[in-house]
Image (cartoon, coloured by chain):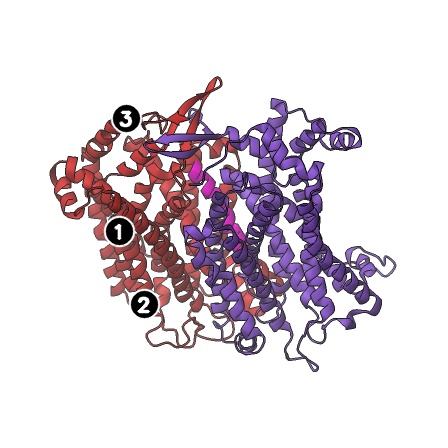
Amino acid sequence: MQKTDGNEVVIPGAPATQEDLTQELLHDSLQTGSRMRKALLISGVLSILGFVGLIMHFASGSSDHTTWNFYAVVYFYVFSVTMGIPMASIGLRMARAQWRRPTSRSAELFAIAGPINLIFFIPILLVAPPIEGRNSLWMDWALAPWFPDIIMMVLLVVTGLAFLYVSLLPDLASVRDHGIGRAQRIATILSRDWNGTKSQWSIHKSALGILGAFYITAYAMTHLVLATDFAMTLVPGWKDPIFPAFHAVTGIQMGTALLIVTMYLLRRLGGFGRYFELEQFWGYSRLLLALSLFYFYFWWCAFILFWYARLPHEQAVVALFISGDYADPSVFSRPQFLMFLGAIGFSFFLPLLLLMWNVLRRSIVGPTIVGVIILIGGFFDRMRLYANAWSVDQVGGHGLEYIPEINAPTISDLFVMVGMISSILFLYLLVSRVVGFVSLWETRQALLLRFVKPWGVGHVSVVIKPE
Amino acid sequence: MQDRPTLTPTQINEELLWPVFSFRRRHAIAFIPPMILLMGGVAAVTILVYQGLWVTGLARPAFWGFFIVNFVFWIGVSHAGTMISAILRLTQAEWKRPITRAAEVMTIFSLITSLLHPVIHAGRPWRIIYWLLPYDFSRGIWPDIRSPLVWDPIAITTYLTGSVLFVFTALIPDFALIRDQSTGLRKKIYGQLALGWRGTPRQWKLQGIFGLLMSALILPVFVSVHSIVSWDFAVSVVPAWHVTVYAPYFVIGAVHSGVSMVLTLMALMRWIFKLENYIWEDHFDAVGRLLIVIATLWLFFFFLDFAFSFYTREEQELAVMERRLFEWPFNAITVIMVFTSYIIPIPLWLSRRVRRNIPLMFWTSILVNIGMWLERYFLIIPAIERKQELTFLWSNYVPSLIESLVVLASFGMVGFLLLLFAKFVPLVPAWEAKEGVVFREDVQFGQVVLPGIIKETEEENVW
């Protein structure tokens, strides 16, 4: 029987002792250097652009929702990506994947984007057309769909923040007890009476499990209502029950992609190389491959039915989201078709072609490149869905009667996009100054639950499974 | 944490190979119930072939009944093998070891059983050949390859072929083991089946690579099979069938019923073959946790299908939903289905104590499969047995005794084939059991001993 005091090597290249780990994650990484200050300053300033863009949009009118089509694209893209990242971490946490431990903080920290998503959701509610005369899930309930949509959004954001807070607690206590300066003062307030007693750890574990399950449920239900109320109902004849699931899965796909890119940047620029190692990139690249396959599968399940049945109202939906208007003889001059090519090419074909190779999947650069590709593909996909759906001005009817022209994006859309992304980045970096990018307690636990031992002429890892 | 017995290779050989080298009473008794069911089914099919389809309850407009429901159900169950083996193999889940073989073999037998149903459903089984092949060259009549009814046999036979290869490759080390412990004709037969296996490092490496490759290749086939089965319904324009979510909904339902069936099988194997040293409470716990996720996903897709039935408020679709929810017997079926598939088992499985209680897990897994069978009935029958625009003669579908006997016989057939298989090959792979012992490392952690798993260390990053 092997005995361990938890001091053997854990993460390849990671500090060998618990003390080193504490020093590095609690002190060194919480220092705010000049590069961090610049990043905070730039992102803070650029955040203002989002609100400028909003004002410009409202100034140009809010009565015609078709002029807000690219606002919807930007909003649902940023929402999908940022709220999808915690899903990747929570799912792996529930599956008890040990390798994700060093990455969970950088993923779950994206829950901080929730309030920004909530603020920028308000214009969507204000400008989206009423549901009278349209298909709807809500059966003429009073205040529907706006009220249930707000409830779901708030629930998702609050659950995400609660999950983040609970996962931060042990580290906040560590900063309180061993940290310095402003971070320590904030951590003292936030860590409350956490002392790491056995009962506190037990409650902590249960709370993470329950909040994680809540987050997953809220995530699925929010995507269900938002995808239906702000995309599907806008297009007469579009009935696609798989679409909310597609919307949710692509959100997780884009979230995982952004997490990989974030890990790469933190590794390169933040000096976190020993925490974001090959094992983490490899693990997430497998998840990314699976999610890319899901992208295609869910899309195909809808497409084949619409294509096969040849029902006129479904053919119109295919034209709107995939092929473009058949009246245009050249498919390559149809914007809908180009958007579709970009979406499926960057979200499925290229990731599949790259990640199917072991040498690329099991590397650091390979998954990062694919991550960037998927983030581009995801934007094309949201553009394909929302720019088209929000361009439809026909109300009611059994099916779409004509393929509408798409309003081009304006400078205010660009401002909103830059502003939203910057404000999320600003908050992300700001919170990281107190709690860091790597979870100290999770990494310390990982250190205890894994060690290397000699095996024949080489070495093997022993992963301890406490349950 | 349950005490995990430390097993020697000799003990593993003895405990796993006894059904092959002897025929004990418990094994013989286990054959009786499935054989009775099977004989009932054979009699029913004989009557059906002799007298024709009028002995069934099929009548205008419901020409798809119990046989098709049962076909879909068994295709679903067949998904367990791939789910357990391929996915758990790719994710390197250690706990899969003792249950892979039974799950994979169940895939094959379920597929064979399901394939029989369209043949029986044809009424004149020998005429099925006309449906499968081009037969009338002079008149230029060909099967319509655009029909999902042609995609079906292609997908299922591909899956069957892949599954047989998958199982056979994993069987080779055990064939060699039986060969080495046998004499005479048995040695010759198993020698042929073992394909010259000597357990060299190269052979183990090739076997491992093949297993991983097959896992990766068979996964798309596994998803496609039940998707295509769902498209038998969904590509039509029948209200309540023409739904985009049908494919993933069918697949996840299939996995739900298949993995539950594996749970049933695990308990039965443990009792019949005395496999307590191999199938632990930990395994029931792990499968139970997996099922909570699967069942919840199933519920989500069920909800999507259900909620969107009301989305467009089309008269015909609402009529089907009204039938499903308010008309006898579908209202009862709906309630029983939801309760047995989710509301009863899942809250129970949330408790660790229940997940480690084998009799409870056995009975709840059976409940799930009752629910999942009824779900197929709920999806298929109400949509077709009703008056539509151009239907001028209609009646309710009432399944006959003949059909019920065939359904029961299908369970008997799968059980019989599994028991027969266990007479020739161990249902728990002996080599996996031995590998599991080697890759296990108990670690003293303070005052407790925790189980550990040995894994390869990561190579140096070259990028």
- Residues at circles 2 and 3 in contact by the CB criterion of under 8 Å: no
Position of the N terminus of chain B, as image quadrant, is top left
User: Looking at the colours in the rendered structure, which chain would you say is drawn in purple?
Assistant: B
Residue A127 numbered tag: 2
Q: Could you tell me which chain the residue with mark 1 belongs to?
A: A
Image-quadrant location for residue B186 = top right
Dot 2, crowdedness within 10 Å: few (<14), some or many (≥20)?
some
Q: Name the spot of residue B238 as percent of width and height, x first.
A: 61, 70
Boundaries of the magenta span: A283-299
Q: Could you tell me which chain the residue with mark 3 belongs to?
A: A
Closer to the chain start, of discs 2 and 3, is 3
Tell me the SS state at disc 2: helix
Q: Residue at x 63, y 77 (%)?
A: B386
The residue singled out by tag 1 in the image is A419
Q: Amino acid at mark 2?
A: Val
Q: Residue at x 58, y 28 (%)?
A: B9
Image-quadrant location for residue A123 = bottom left
The residue singled out by tag 3 in the image is A17
Q: Is residue A397 left or right of residue B449?
A: right
Q: CA distance from mark 2 to mark 3?
A: 56 Å
Q: Name the spot of residue A284 as percent of width and height, x first.
A: 42, 40
Looking at the image, which residue sits at the far right? B138
